[in-house]
Amino acid sequence: MAKKGKNYRKALEDIDTSKMYSLQEGVELALKGSYAKFDESVDIAIRLGVDPRHADQMVRSSVVLPNGTGKDIRVLVFAKGDKEKEALDAGADYAGGDEFVEKIKGGWLEFDRTIATPDMMATVGKIGRILGPRNLMPNAKLGTVTFDVGRVVKEIKSGKVDFKVDKAGVIHAMLGKASFGSQKVKENILAFVDRIIQLKPSTSKGIYLKSISLSTTMGPGVKVDPLDIRNQVKQA
């Protein structure tokens, strides 16, 4: 195991790794553990009581965070005609069709998210082997295959986060920046967990929110009590 630096060890001194903190305490400790010279991201890891090997226990969706992510998301929209113009007017960084397919085939990947109108999916399918493994393929389940491109572009630009449970039953997401401060980070976490709770599969038995951990990019993880978060979601 790699040896941790002195700044990491110093941040860890304030954290009892055997304890589950309240959401307020957890957020404050995670932010306090931010020591890098850049504005660190705030990350969450939620272990769910699901078995992703079963299709009916796959948890996957998206949520628009109330305070955004703090990250400038570059959006590419596959559309033509009026929908191309609608996408650009809504703030898309790029919009078009075959010309972008050819650029991507040539190695261009200067974008973070993609949207496509349904009539463009056959065209996008030509580069599915490039976009798919990078989680860049437009997906109807996530709302990124749609004719309502203007609305979706605005949502993504304002802080829409996609998430998917991994093979280990864990959901990872970036929910803001350390510079947001504890209140905005807390609001984002509650919105995110609320969406996760809404998506609980009917076939999931036992404890659904098994564990929740917060951390900044370089800082140590902080365990947060799932029951405390659930109670605050109910009160929100």
Image (cartoon, rainbow, N blue to C red):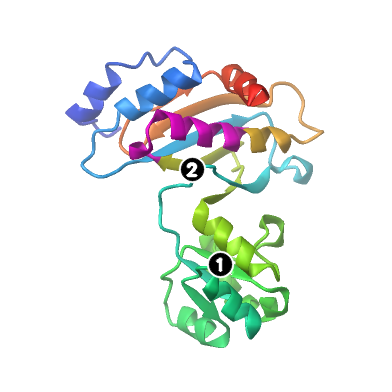
**Whether residue 105 is situated above or below residue 174 in the rendered picture:** below
CA neighbours of label 1 inside 10 A, class few (<14), some (14 to 19), many (20+): many
Q: Which residue is mark 1?
A: 114
Q: Compare residues 75 and 104 and report the one nearer the observer.
A: 75
Q: Compare residues 215 and 52 and report the one nearer the observer.
A: 215
The quadrant in which residue 85 appears is bottom right
User: Residue at position x 51%, y 54% from top?
Assistant: 158
CA neighbours of label 2 inside 10 A, class few (<14), some (14 to 19), many (20+): some
The overriding secondary structure of the stretch rendered in magenta is: helix
Does the magenta run of residues contain 7?
Answer: no
Residue 126 visible in this rendered orientation of the protein? no
Give the residue furthest to the left: 6
Q: Magenta part of the protein: which range?
A: 177-193
* Left or right: 59 in relation to 103: right
**Whether residue 200 is situated above or below residue 130 in the rendered picture:** above
Q: Residue 15, image x and y in percent? A: 34, 17
Q: Residue 172, image x and y in percent? A: 52, 40
* Amino acid type, callout 1: Thr
User: Residue at position x 72%, y 35% from top?
Assistant: 198
Q: Which residue is mark 2?
A: 67
